[in-house]
Amino acid sequence: MNGLFRNALVGLTITLVAAKSRDVSAQDWAKARTEKSPRHREYVDIKYGERTIKAFVVYPESKEKTPVVLVVHEIFGLTDWAKSLCDQLAENGVIAICPDLLSGQAYPDDIDGAIKAISALPKPQVKADLDATADYALTKIPSANGKLAVCGFCWGGGWAFGYANENPKLKASFSFYGTAPDAPEKIANIGCPVYGFYGELDARVNATIPKAEELMKAAGKKYEPVIYTGAGHGFMREGEMPAANDANKKARDDAWTCWKSLLKQI
């Protein structure tokens, strides 16, 4: 892998102070939303080699075949919010599939445990899991139209950007507050547009944007980052919480408006 995804780990671990200030594993508000959804959802087993991973899939209500968006979850794992996000994508006309990258492991019941477990995942295994999920999306879902995009959040946002360099079949990459590539070889094979969504108060991640802009421009590739005023890291989740502050809520709403428009272009 030549260290292609080093940035996906370095700098994508949530600070302990921020992580411990709220229990992201307690997401009853997100769980309730998904349970009330009229859209079909299911778990599927995806097998490759000797490994089997589970993935969560939500289908839009559509009379036509639709694109698929591969969702790379946060460093907290396949949480209720990640599942709710999949439902929201399906609500907007695409099939959403989110592989559980901790498949085969005992699931941590606390934030620090999840961060530790996901940070320790072998990079080749994560890439292979994403490859297997992408292949499943393109060949095993009858209602898919053959078009595939990827999105990711936090740790998953870094992977979403990096995975665009690994999978030539992608039509778009949507990276939400994930660190960006920092070397020419990490963007050399990107064949799709990359859209970045960032919070103004996330200097750690935002510090990686200028180098990525420079690299992508020099390589003639499309990278469009947007920084939302007053928003912090994780604003897509934070902005949806019942006690969301105004800046995170507005950033989430504005990002969704932009994202919906981009999804229609796939």
Image: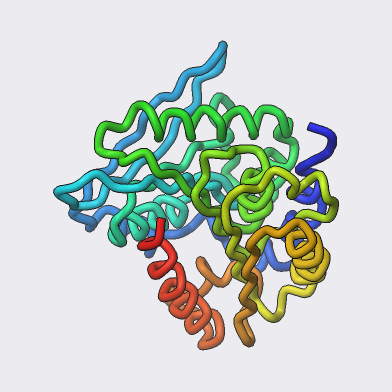
The answer to whether 119 is drawn above or below residue 88 in the figure is: above
Image side of residue 153 versus residue 147, left or right: right
Q: Residue furthest top?
A: 50
Image side of residue 83 versus residue 185, left or right: left
Q: Please provide percent x and percent y for residue 257.
A: 41, 75
The residue under the point 49% across, 84% down is: 250
Q: Please provide percent x and percent y for residue 227.
A: 64, 78
Q: Who is closer to the viewer here, 30 or 143?
A: 143
Q: Who is closer to the viewer here, 144 or 217?
A: 217
Q: Residue furthest front?
A: 220
The residue under the point 68% across, 53% down is: 158
Q: Quadrant of the N terminus?
A: top right
Coloring scheme used: rainbow
Tell me the quarter of the picture where residue 91 sits: bottom left
Does residue 111 appear in this view?
no
Does residue 213 appear in this view?
yes
The answer to whether 159 is drawn above or below residue 143 in the figure is: below
The residue under the point 50% across, 45% down is: 78
Q: How many marks?
A: 0
Q: Please provide percent x and percent y for residue 144.
A: 31, 39
Q: Please provide percent x and percent y for residue 199.
A: 64, 76
The answer to whether 221 is drawn above or below residue 117 in the figure is: below
Q: Who is closer to the viewer here, 209 or 124?
A: 209
The residue under the point 26% across, 53% down is: 35
Image side of residue 190 versus residue 48, left or right: right
Q: Residue furthest left?
A: 63
Q: Quadrant of the C terminus?
A: bottom left
Q: Who is closer to the viewer here, 21 or 209?
A: 209
The answer to whether 239 is drawn above or below residue 115 in the figure is: below
Image side of residue 17 versus residue 45, left or right: right
